[in-house]
Amino acid sequence: MFKVMFVCMGNVCRSPLAHILLDNYLKKNGLTDKISVESSGVNVFSEGQKLCDNIVRTASKRGLSIEHYSRKFYPDDGEDFNLILAMDNITMSRIKSIIKNTKVNGKIQFFRYFDPVQDGSSEVPDPWSGGRDESEMVYNMIERTMQPLVDSILNN
């Protein structure tokens, strides 16, 4: 089974949304036996925090019920997952400093690498302090990236 880990700062906005959207995509397409998914954060001080309200509202508006509790990114995650997807530059840097094993660096990529709409940025904006519009934009960005991500995994 191919294991994917989405990582952002606090594991309360972007990475859990990607986790849930990929999980739903896999269920709808009968691929849960091929790919598993998890999410975490590099700046989680206390595990078990709930999702940010903006993401919950945005997902709920689209009929998606989300229950998620934050989880830290651990050094062993570098060994345990086949693909680790960072949501921004700071997260990418923190992942590499946490893992400290250069052999797994090839597993670490920016999530936006798979985004079919390229705008020159490697980052998914953090909707934590943004409003509804920013949460909608992040939701759309993550949702449109699921199929290209899965296609890439299955074709390699």
Image (cartoon, rainbow, N blue to C red):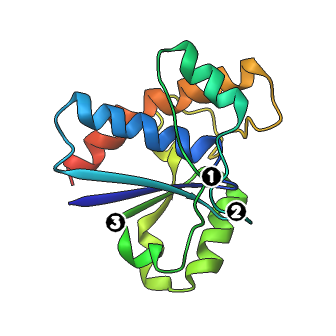
Q: Alpha carbon of mark 3 to alpha carbon of mark 1: how far?
A: 19 Å
Nearer mark to the viewer, of 3 and 1: 1
Q: Amino acid at mark 1?
A: Asn
Q: Quadrant of residue 130?
A: top right
Q: Residue at x 60, y 70 (%)?
A: 95
x, y percent for residue 149: 36, 42
Q: Residues within 10 Å of mark 1 (few under 14, many from 20)?
A: many
* 66 to 44, vertically: above or below: above
* In the image: residue 16, left or right of residue 54: left
Q: Earlier in the sequence, mark 2 or mark 1?
A: 1
| Label placed on residue 11 | 1
Which residue corresponds to the image point at 52% horizontal and 38% vertical from the top-left?
A: 67
Q: Quadrant of the C terminus?
A: bottom left
Which labelled disc corresponds to residue 82? 3
Residue 98, above or below 155: below
Q: Secondary structure at mark 2?
A: loop
Q: Amino acid at mark 2?
A: Val
Secondary element under disc 1, as helix, strand or loop, is loop
Answer yes or no: do the residues labelled 2 and 1 have beta carbons within 8 Å?
A: yes
* Mark in the foreground, 2 or 3: 2
33 to 106, vertically: above or below:
above
**x then y, percent, for residue 62:** 51, 14
Q: Which residue is mark 2?
A: 44
